[in-house]
Amino acid sequence: MESLIEKSVSTPYGEKTVSVHALDIASVSEPLDIMTVSAFVRGYAPTPRTLLGALSDRNISVRQLAEEPEIDLRDLCNVWLSKEIRGGDLPIRRIGCIELLGYAVRYSTEARDERRIASSIRAYFSMLEIAALSGIPCETVGLPILGGGIQDVSMDLVATPMISECVRLLKDCEQIKRIRVITNNKKQAEAFARTLDSSYSILAQRSGGQEKGAASERRGKVFLSFSSKDRRFADLLCARLERAGVGVWYAPRDIQTNDYASAIFDAISHCDDFIVILSRDSLRSNHVLNEVDLAFRQLDRGIRLLPLKLDDAELGPAFSYYLSRIQRYEANGCGTEACLSGFIQKNFSDQNGDTVREGTV
């Protein structure tokens, strides 16, 4: 099964892989222990030109499998895993389902709630781990780009949590060896492959599982500083940067040690760009102030400080000491998409609009 990209992940159980494939599910030849589908809540109709429809055409009825699943967590978090498939015309042993959206919220603001979507993705991957620990065969797992079909969920919302959970699962779960991201939409596959290629979750991997010091070995990346109350915006900014090919060091996702403070210090000491999201909440955060102080001390080596101001809150004396002479990008008053596009275009693109700071090793 030819891939657009395949990345290795070093784990205590040996090298594992995550890959991206642009092909129709009907063309899958490699046996998959679990093939994931993304559905509306309790919505298993085999709609034409969807993954559920393609599976139905190959005699795999997700609707029937949902009637009596092997693992059923729908009442808790809308995920379930089927029993072993009997019959069917594809080399798929089981179906795993994540019910990402309800029909009623498809076009609502909830459909674009980054935290809720990320939480649903974590729940699905946690179920896969439960399945593996229960003795269910799951050496090779197939994934679509979750929500990427008729659910119309932006890839900006799903790519980063999907990649982070893929890496976490491969590292923590001995039984799962390979994760294949499969979509028949070539444009989506290529965009996801670019995000995978620049993701810190992938680039931080070192042979033998030696995570310590990974930040100091990687150059050309961005450190993202923010208040936890601004995580929704920070998640979206991180996803947009990585989709544009800019590597991001992002806590807590990229902390590979229990020594949180040392990890932050090491990452700031070796990043090329430091983005601080300024808001009423972050300007009251001592942690954000400490990170700005560390970044300020790195100016002599050429680090760029990039303040991104979300609202009209005043900097105050402490932040003014570090940032008053540094140009700020004023985002207050513009929509989120316009803000992100403008900020990335201004700071990470050349005159032709091409991304120039790739964040690669």
Image (cartoon, grey):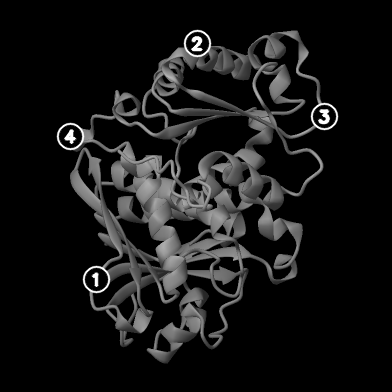
Residue position marked by numbered label 3 in the rendering = 312
- Please, what is the three-letter code of the amino acid marked with disc 4? Gly
Q: Secondary structure at mark 3?
A: loop
Q: Is residue 186 above or below residue 158?
A: below
Q: Residues within 10 Å of mark 1 (few under 14, many from 20)?
A: few
Quadrant in the picture for the N terminus: bottom left
Determine the image quadrant of residue 131: bottom left
Disc on the earlier residue, 3 or 1: 1
**Marks 3 and 4, how far apart in space?**
48 Å
Disc on the earlier residue, 1 or 2: 1
Relative to 195, 41 lies left or right: right
Residue sitting at x 65%, y 46%:
342
**Marks 1 and 2, how far apart in space?**
47 Å
Residue position marked by numbered label 2 in the rendering = 297
Whether residue 115 appears in this view of the structure is yes
- Please, what is the three-letter code of the amino acid marked with disc 2? Arg
Residue 2 is labelled as 1
Q: Position of residue 353 (x, y in %)?
A: 53, 52
Q: Position of residue 127 (x, y in %)?
A: 44, 54
**Marks 3 and 1, how far apart in space?**
50 Å
Determine the image quadrant of residue 259: top left
Residue sitting at x 48%, y 52%:
354
Disc on the earlier residue, 2 or 3: 2
Determine the image quadrant of residue 19: bottom left
Discs 3/1, front: 3
Discs 1/2, front: 2
